[in-house]
Amino acid sequence: MRRLMIIRIGKVKVKFDYISIAFLALCSIVFSERFTACVLCAAIHEAGHAVTLLHFGCDSLELRLRLLCVDMMDNGRTKRSPAEHALCILAGPLMNFLCIPLFWLLFDRFDKAIFMQCAQSSAALGIFNMLPFVSTDGGELLEMLLMKLMPPQRAQRIVEIITAAVIAAAAAAVAITMLNRISLGL
């Protein structure tokens, strides 16, 4: 059984596994400011979800931080209206987008690269999470909207097909680019 570090902040319980902590520490040493900016923006993103969930009546919230992913479990999903649930989904990317001008102003004022990296990471994370893929906020929102029109299994399948199609197209684009570079001797 994996050992977890558990931190409670009000109604939010945060669980880290020790492998994730070691990985984050190593990456922050190797990749320095860029990685730190990404972790900070991911924390801001998840905080947006958490604050909105608690606002809409979640009695307790559990965040489980694992290698390259965050699981959020809340006990209030069935109590929320569809509009409230959509706002909870959108809150993470919205926090990222709201922080971009703040980081830009901090960069302009203090001329520290970390603030520009935070602005860029925040924009990238917000945009990526709005894409309609499995396990992203955009995918969850699309699935929620499709479930109003069709059975849940069909809605989930459509999001899975979109995800697979985009991944296949991206893989093909990378392969073509690599083959062109090889053929051109670059």
Image (cartoon, rainbow, N blue to C red):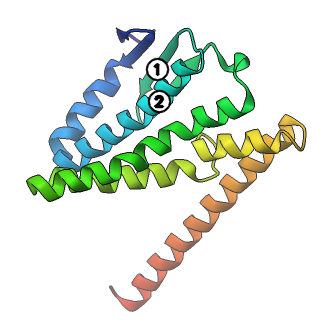
Front residue of 61/24: it is 61
Image position of 166 with respect to 41: above or below: below
Q: Which residue is mark 1?
A: 63
The amino acid at mark 1 is Leu
Tell me, yes or no, if residue 33 can be seen here.
Answer: yes
Q: Which residue is mark 2?
A: 70
Residue furthest to the bottom in view is 184
Q: Which mark is residue 3?
A: none
The amino acid at mark 2 is Val
Image position of 77 with respect to 121: above or below: above
Q: How crowded is the residue under tag 1: few (<14 C-alpha within 10 Å), some, or many (20+)?
A: some
Q: CA distance from mark 2 to mark 1?
A: 7 Å
Q: Going from the N terminus, do you reach mark 2 or mark 1 first?
A: 1
> Residue 115 in the image: x percent, y percent?
20, 51
> Residue 25 in the image: x percent, y percent?
21, 31
Relative placement, left or right, of 33 versus 83 is left
